[in-house]
Image (spheres, helix red, strand yellow):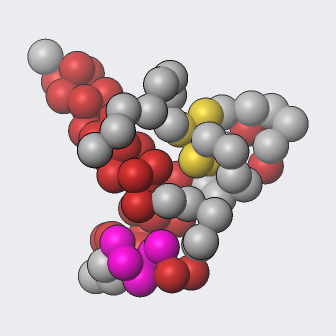
């Protein structure tokens, strides 16, 4: 898988009032976590939000995982 430079989840006060979104989109990262928590698959999320690539979604999940692990240590 290709590497995506920089954070794939961004927070900009001019985009959805600063809610964390996937870089280059207006899709909140929380929508992905809501899908997964609700039992939906990544493919189902990607079908509904075609502006988010699989690579971007997987990179965002990995970034969130690494952030969580860093906070626990």
Identity of the residue furthest to the right in this view:
14
The answer to whether residue 19 is left or right of residue 45 is: right
- Residue in the image at 59% along x and 71% along y: 50
Residue 64 is at least partly visible in this image: no
The answer to whether residue 18 is left or right of residue 3 is: right
Camera-side residue of 13 and 45: 45
Q: Quadrant of the N terminus?
A: top left
Q: Quadrant of the C terminus?
A: top left
Q: For residue 34, what is the image quadrant?
A: bottom left
Residue numbers of the magenta segment:
42-46
Q: Is residue 36 magenta?
A: no
Q: How many marks?
A: 0
Q: For residue 17, what is the image quadrant?
A: top right
When the figure is inspected, residue 40 is found, relative to residue 25, above or below; the finding is: below
Percent of width and height locating residue 72: 17, 24
Camera-side residue of 58 and 16: 58
Identity of the residue furthest to the left in this view:
73
Query: What secondary structure is the stretch in magenta mostly built from?
Result: helix
Camera-side residue of 50 and 10: 50
- Residue in the image at 35% along x and 39% along y: 2
Percent of width and height locating residue 66: 25, 30
Camera-side residue of 2 and 29: 2
- Residue in the image at 50% along x and 23% along y: 6
The answer to whether residue 5 is left or right of residue 18 is: left
Identity of the residue furthest to the top in this view:
73
When the figure is inspected, residue 8 is found, relative to residue 45, above or below; the finding is: above
Q: For residue 39, what is the image quadrant?
A: bottom left
The answer to whether residue 70 is left or right of residue 58 is: left
- Residue in the image at 51% along x and 81% along y: 47
Identity of the residue furthest to the front in this view:
2
Residue 22 is at least partly visible in this image: yes
Percent of width and height locating residue 11: 66, 33
């Amino acid at each position: 898988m290709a590497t995506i430079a920089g954070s794939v989840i961004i927070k900009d006060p001019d985009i959805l009032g600063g809610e964390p979104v996937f870089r280059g989109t207006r899709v909140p990262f929380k929508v992905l976590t809501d899908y997964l928590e609700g039992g939906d698959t990544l493919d189902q999320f990607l079908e509904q939000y075609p502006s988010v690539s699989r690579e971007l979604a997987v990179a965002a999940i990995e970034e969130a995982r690494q952030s969580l692990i860093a906070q626990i240590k």
